[in-house]
Amino acid sequence: MNVAAILKEKGRGVFTTAPDTSLLEITKLLGMHRIGCIVITSADGKVSGIVSERDVVREISRAGASVLTEPVERCMTKSVVTCREADTIDHLMAQMTAHRFRHMPVVEKGRLIGLVSIGDVVRMRIAEAEMEAAAMREYIATG
Ligand code: AMP
């Protein structure tokens, strides 16, 4: 199973916004869409950062609520680790574990085409395990 299979299941929609969006606006977007992170894109559509609920909470705890008027580019993660459609679920799990994050934007030819979360990875892994168990039961029953 690979990233393409996840995107086929969940679709290719990604919530994005510009680097000058305020942190208050980011909290509204996270809350409104019930998501944990937003990909920050530049005017040409390229990924320029990623911000998660953890970044917002950290900034508020560090500088107080006044930080909410600051642009997201001041606290977003700028070195974004991305994946490709052909990457395996195992590769994503290894990356997420090694870097301790829960989201990976999918980029092909420099264009953002989707976003995979740890929840998507776990769901796909469970579906895979269930299919293998069903195949094994079928094999035993008919063998
Ligand atoms: P998360 O676990 O996704 O909520 O993110 C935890 C931290 O990792 C936050 O500081 C995010 O900005 C950062 N982060 C999340 N996803 C990525 C990614 N794909 N590449 C680099 N940093 C990330």
Image (cartoon, grey):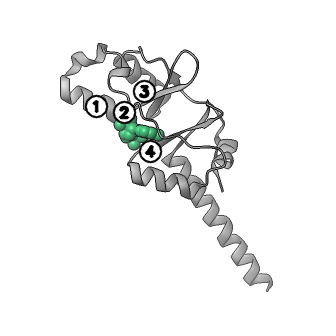
* Image position of 16 with respect to 37: above or below: above
Query: Is label 4 in a helix, a strand or a loop?
Result: loop
Mark nearer the N terminus (3 vs 4): 3
Mark nearer the N terminus (1 vs 3): 3
Q: Is mark 4 within 8 Å of ligand 1?
A: yes
Q: Quadrant of ligand 1?
A: top left
Q: CA distance from mark 2 to mark 4?
A: 11 Å
Query: Which residue is under mark 4?
Result: 102
Front one among 127 and 77: 77
Q: Is mark 1 within 8 Å of ligand 1?
A: no
Q: Is residue 9 left or right of residue 43?
A: right
**Are the two marked residues, 1 and 3, in contact with CB atoms closer than 8 angstroms?**
no
Q: Position of residue 95 (x, y in %)?
A: 47, 51
Mark nearer the N terminus (3 vs 2): 3
State which mark lies toward you, 1 or 3.
Answer: 1
Residue at the far bottom: name it.
Answer: 143
Mark nearer the N terminus (2 vs 4): 2
Q: Residues within 10 Å of mark 4 (few under 14, many from 20)?
A: some
As shown in the figure, which amino acid type bears the numbered disc 4? Arg
Q: Is residue 133 left or right of residue 74?
A: right
As shown in the figure, which amino acid type bears the numbered disc 2? Glu
Query: Which residue is under mark 3?
Result: 31
Residue at position x 64%, y 62% in the image: 128
Q: Residues within 10 Å of mark 3 (few under 14, many from 20)?
A: few
